[in-house]
Image (cartoon, rainbow, N blue to C red):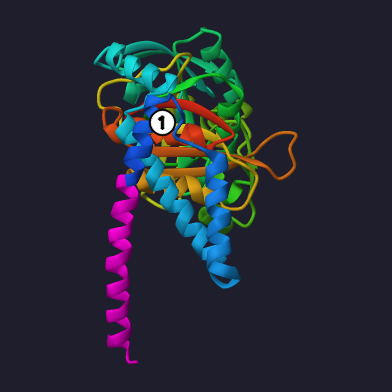
């Protein structure tokens, strides 16, 4: 047979498959109505295992793995459709709907805000982009920002989560898992690093350069070109500038902002020191309790999945089935458990869309542990 004849056969088979798929989905409606009438959950794990075992027996060793993947996806699509038919709501989806209708329409313009570092930090720039008149309290580390918000010391906290050049700030994801706070907003800030030193310093005099480890990564090309200087990480880019200014040592420099040059009386030896001009850091704004403002279309979750093959694939397949757009996926180790991880998801979907509730319902049913971090919008 030539390829045209083979493709004609495939087309005929696909027509039969599509007819059977529609028949199966229509039958799933009857199952959904029965489950609703008898107060049964959509997920029946024992039934799914039985179906997959039957599929293995019917397809044989050669196609077993492919057939199980196909049928797992088919059952995930079926569950999504059954949830749509039932219109089922979970306590979480009900709570989110209440928050979406009960939160004020406009994000506050004035608030007390915790930031890590000191005056001139990029988190300060993020706070000033979100709030018209933030009352900023600085902390020595990110954990202090989380504690201040969790304890009610400040209303909000600003934290960096990822950079377009250096990637994710892993420590923040670990602290999100540790502290009971919610994400209520995010914001992107353009980051321009400058090599700052005491007035009169020459670049060949520099022997040590301070900055945050993310900024050091973002300026790796410049640092590699300075053969006589080495980089030393510190807690914050603004702290680095302050250290150089107060230390009075002309062999020290800092990678920091132009604002810090003005604040601490330093001189920019090199401007635009980052590897890429398109260098942005994304910050999240956290609060003690969830707040869902108008236009919220991004949801952050932490999921603990069964430690078995295909667990993550099932979640990705489920998101695809409900039409949700995954914009961020990060894995972090679970403390005290060897080689097991918690997955962090950012999912783009309007809080008001019917797909949103179905997505949450499906995810809750598919995970060993489910943590809702918030639904919010991002300021660009």
Q: What secondary structure is the stretch in magenta mostly built from? A: helix
Picture layout, residue 344 above or below residue 102: below
Picture quarter with the C terminus? top left
Q: Which residue is drawn at the image coordinates 50% and 58% (left, top)?
A: 69
Picture layout, residue 212 above or below residue 8: above
Magenta-colored stretch includes residue 285: no
The answer to whether 41 appears left or right of 342 in the picture is left
- Mark 1: few, some, or many residues within 10 Å (few <14, many ≥20)? some
The answer to whether 234 appears left or right of 100 in the picture is right
Quick one: SS at disc 1? helix
Magenta-colored stretch includes residue 19: yes
- Residue 219 appears anywhere in the view: no
In the image, 149 versus 240, the foreground residue is 149
In the image, 25 versus 319, the foreground residue is 25
Picture layout, residue 322 above or below residue 39: below
Residue 181 position, x and y percent, is: 51, 19
Residue 284 position, x and y percent, is: 43, 29
Q: Which residue is drawn at the image coordinates 37% and 11% (left, top)?
A: 111
Q: Which residue is drawn at the image coordinates 37% and 40% (left, top)?
A: 80
In the image, 193 versus 354, the foreground residue is 354
Residue holding disc 1: 35
In the image, 210 versus 86, the foreground residue is 86
For the image shown, how many numbered marks are present on the structure? 1
The answer to whether 335 appears left or right of 349 in the picture is right
Q: Residue furthest bottom?
A: 1
What residue range appears in magenta?
A: 1-26
Residue 3 position, x and y percent, is: 32, 87
Picture quarter with the N terminus? bottom left
């Amino acid at each position: 047979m030539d390829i045209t004849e083979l493709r004609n056969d495939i087309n005929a088979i696909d027509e039969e498959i599509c007819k059977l798929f529609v028949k199966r989905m229509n039958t799933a409606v009857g199952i959904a109505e029965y489950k609703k009438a008898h107060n049964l959950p959509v997920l029946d794990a024992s039934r799914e295992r039985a179906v997959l075992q039957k599929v293995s027996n019917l397809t044989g060793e050669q196609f077993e793995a492919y057939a199980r993947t196909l049928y797992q996806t088919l059952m995930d699509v079926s569950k999504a459709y059954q949830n749509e038919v039932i219109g089922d709501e979970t306590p979480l989806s009900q709570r989110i709907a209440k928050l979406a209708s009960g939160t004020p329409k406009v994000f506050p313009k004035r608030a007390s805000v915790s930031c890590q570092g000191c005056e001139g930090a990029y988190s300060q720039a993020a706070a000033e982009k979100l709030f018209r008149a933030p009352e900023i309290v600085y902390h020595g580390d990110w954990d202090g920002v989380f504690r201040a918000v969790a304890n009610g010391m400040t209303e909000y906290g600003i934290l960096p989560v990822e950079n377009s050049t250096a990637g994710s700030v892993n420590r923040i994801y670990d602290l999100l898992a540790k502290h009971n706070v919610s994400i209520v907003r995010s914001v992107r800030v353009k980051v321009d690093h400058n090599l700052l030193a005491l007035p009169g310093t020459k670049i060949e005099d520099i022997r040590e350069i301070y900055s945050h480890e993310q900024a050091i990564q973002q300026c790796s090309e410049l640092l590699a070109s300075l053969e006589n200087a080495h980089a030393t990480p510190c807690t914050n880019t603004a702290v680095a500038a302050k250290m150089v200014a107060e230390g009075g040592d002309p062999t020290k420099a800092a990678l920091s902002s132009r604002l810090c040059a003005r604040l601490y009386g330093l001189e920019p030896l090199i401007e635009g020191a980052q590897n890429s001009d398109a260098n942005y850091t994304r910050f999240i704004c956290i609060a003690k309790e969830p707040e869902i403002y108008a236009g919220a279309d991004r949801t952050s979750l932490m999921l603990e999945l069964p430690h078995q093959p295909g667990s993550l694939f099932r979640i990705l397949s489920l998101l695809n089935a409900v039409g949700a757009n995954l914009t961020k996926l990060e894995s972090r180790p679970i403390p005290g458990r060897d080689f097991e991880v918690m997955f962090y998801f950012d999912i783009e979907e309007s809080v008001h869309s019917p797909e949103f509730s179905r997505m949450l319902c499906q995810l809750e049913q598919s995970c060993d542990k489910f943590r809702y971090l918030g639904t919010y919008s991002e300021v660009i």
